[in-house]
């Protein structure tokens, strides 16, 4: 948790879904068409023996891709076991290469060099790696070009994510978000940008090849949920540690699926009903219903609980 959260009462471990229960949910989801699984958080690397969960999921027929999103604080220590267990890809949050700025943004004492150590180790082990960066106006615009240079030099795709009003974001205003178009305009001053095709249906990032004047190349992507919402194409469900399904990143509450843990048939039926009734489109109605919606940070599920 960021230090700004103050005293934090962690969920009792007895409330966690076991690895076997998570495995049941994933098997049932695969039967309904899911092919990709992402472990997120909070911080997934805080869950003891995470590699054992990865190993279970990697053995499920129909799971084609297992990914993880992490702040990278413990990545260098754990990536070897995770790669051996079957982790395919890892996405690491990195908002600045400057230590003081990085710790200020994250609200923790995790140093960027420690995060970079994990990133490079994952890459060297053959695990696919991406970097996620959130740019906030008046905070870290200065890091757009340095992070891009680093990503190109190390051969790691970089994603710029627009700063969002997710739960726990205090005093958010639309003007705080540096839009993807603004970031692209700055990158265009140093690089040539060449559009890349989508890799799969429902891909949330628009991808571009960066070409430098000296011939260097890299990949950058933009996730534009503020300026260019993509609710209609969303195909992601989120499972919390205590067994709730969230159909939207901006949800105010989840749906308890623990009653369906009795069997795979029961879980499949429960998940099918939950997803069929999905009508979430918060990002698309943010402006038109700003006065009608309760948009306070306290009304939404905290990012530290629901993940990205």
Image: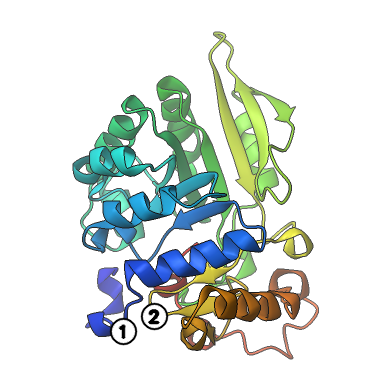
Placement of 209 over or under 185, stated as above or below: above
Q: In front: 277, or 121?
A: 277
Q: Quadrant of residue 184?
A: top right
Question: Along the horizontal axis of the image, is 168 left or right of 216?
Answer: left
Whether residue 160 is visible, yes or no, is yes
Q: Is residue 286 among the parts visible in the rendering?
A: no
Q: Residue at x 54, y 77 (%)?
A: 245
> Residue 206: x, y in percent?
69, 42
Instruction: Give the image quarter of residue 96.
Output: top left
For residue 238, the mark is none
Q: Which residue is mark 2?
A: 242
Display colour scheme? rainbow
Q: Quadrant of residue 292?
A: bottom right
Residue 284 vs residue 46: left or right?
right
Disc 2 is placed on an element classified as loop
Of the 4 image quadrants, the one containing the N terminus is bottom left
Residue 256: x and y in percent read: 51, 86
10 Å neighbourhood of mark 1: few (<14), some, or many (≥20)? few
Q: Residue furthest top?
A: 214
Query: Residue 23: image x %, image y %?
Result: 43, 64
Q: Secondary structure at mark 1?
A: helix
Is 283 left or right of 30, judged from the image as shown?
right
The percent coordinates of residue 280 (x first, y second) are 71, 76
- Asked if the residue at tag 2 contacts the one at tag 1, i.e. Cβ–Cβ closer than 8 Å, the answer is yes
> Which residue is denoted by mark 1 in the rendering?
15
Residue at 23% from the left image edge and 52% from the top image edge = 110
Q: Residue at x 53, y 56 (%)?
A: 137
């Amino acid at each position: 948790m960021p230090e700004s959260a103050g005293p934090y009462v962690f969920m009792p471990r007895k409330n966690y879904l076991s690895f076997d229960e998570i495995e049941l949910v994933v098997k049932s989801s695969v039967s309904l068409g899911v092919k990709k699984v992402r472990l997120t958080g909070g911080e997934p690397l805080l869950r003891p023996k995470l590699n054992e969960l990865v190993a279970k999921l990697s053995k499920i027929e129909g799971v084609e891709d297992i990914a993880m999103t992490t702040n990278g604080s413990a990545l260098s220590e754990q990536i070897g076991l995770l790669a051996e267990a079957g982790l395919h890809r890892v996405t690491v949050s990195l908002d600045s290469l400057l230590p003081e700025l990085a710790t200020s943004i994250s609200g923790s004492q995790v140093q960027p060099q420690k995060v970079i150590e994990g990133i490079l180790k994952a890459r060297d082990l053959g695990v696919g790696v991406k970097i996620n960066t959130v740019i906030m106006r008046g905070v870290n615009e200065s890091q757009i070009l340095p992070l891009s240079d680093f990503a190109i030099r190390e051969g790691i795709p970089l994603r710029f994510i627009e700063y969002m009003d997710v739960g726990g974001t205090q005093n958010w205003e639309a003007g705080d978000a540096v839009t993807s178009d603004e970031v692209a305009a700055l990158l265009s001053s140093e690089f040539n940008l060449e559009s890349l095709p989508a890799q799969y249906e429902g891909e949330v990032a628009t991808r571009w090849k960066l070409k430098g004047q000296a011939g260097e190349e890299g990949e950058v992507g933009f996730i534009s949920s503020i300026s260019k919402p993509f609710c209609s194409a969303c195909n992601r469900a989120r499972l919390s540690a205590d067994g709730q399904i969230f159909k939207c990143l901006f949800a105010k509450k989840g749906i308890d699926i623990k009653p369906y843990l009795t069997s795979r048939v029961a879980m499949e039926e429960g998940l099918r009903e939950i997803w069929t009734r999905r009508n979430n489109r918060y990002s698309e109605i943010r402006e038109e219903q700003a006065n009608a919606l309760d948009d306070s940070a306290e009304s939404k599920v905290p990012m530290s609980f629901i993940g990205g």
